[in-house]
Amino acid sequence: MEANDYQRLALRTEAPGRERDDRLLNAALGLSGEAGEVADTLKKWAFHGHPLDETALRNELGDVLWYVALAADALGLTLEEIMEANIAKLRRRYPEGFSRERSLERSE
C-alpha cells in the first residue's frame, strides 16, 4: 500500500466536521496515547516478564500511523511529503548513514 493511499483510506474513519485546530489537537493527544501504549507493551515485556506481544505492537503502531495521517491532513500535507522531507533531513544530517560522531556534532 502506498502512503498517500493509506492516508486517504484511514481518514475515511475520522469524525466529520472538526476544525483544523481540533484535528491537530486530537492528533497530538492521540499520538501521545498510542505511543504510550507501544511503550507499555514493551515495558511489560522488558520488565514484567510478559512475552513480547508483536500483534499488539503492530496494532498500536497502526494507531500511531492513523494519528500521523490525521495531523498531516490537518496541515494540508500528505504522508509522502512528510516522508520525503524526513529522508532529506536525514541525508543532510547523516550523508553516509548514522555515525556517532555526526550525532554528537549535530547542530539541528
Image (cartoon, helix red, strand yellow):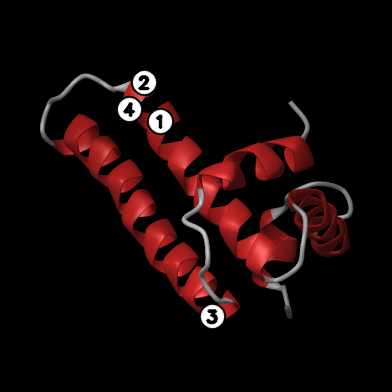
Of the residues shown, which amino acid type is indicated by label 2? Thr
Disc 1/disc 3 C-alpha distance (Å): 26 Å
Q: Position of residue 75 (x, y in %)?
A: 69, 71
Disc 2/disc 3 C-alpha distance (Å): 33 Å
Q: Position of residue 4 (x, y in %)?
A: 77, 42
**Category of crowding for the residue at label 2, using alpha-carbon neighbours closer than 10 angstroms: few (below 14), some (14–19), many (at least 20):** few
Of the residues shown, which amino acid type is indicated by label 4? Ala
Q: In terms of secondary structure, where does tag 4 sit?
A: helix
Q: In terms of secondary structure, where does tag 2 sit?
A: helix
Residue furthest to the left? 48
Q: Are marks 1 and 2 in contact (CB under 8 Å)?
A: yes
Between 19 and 104, the one nearer to me in the picture: 19
Q: Position of residue 11 (x, y in %)?
A: 59, 47
Q: Are marks 4 and 2 in contact (CB under 8 Å)?
A: yes
Which residue is disc 4 drawn over? Answer: 56
Disc 4/disc 2 C-alpha distance (Å): 4 Å
**Category of crowding for the residue at label 1, using alpha-carbon neighbours closer than 10 angstroms: few (below 14), some (14–19), many (at least 20):** few
User: Compared to 85, does 80 lie above or below?
Assistant: above
Q: Are marks 1 and 4 in contact (CB under 8 Å)?
A: yes
Quarter of image, res 41: top left
Which residue is disc 1 drawn over? Answer: 59
Which residue is disc 2 drawn over? Answer: 55
Which residue is disc 3 drawn over? Answer: 21
Residue plotted at (68% across, 61% down): 73
Q: First in sequence, mark 2 or 3: give its number.
A: 3
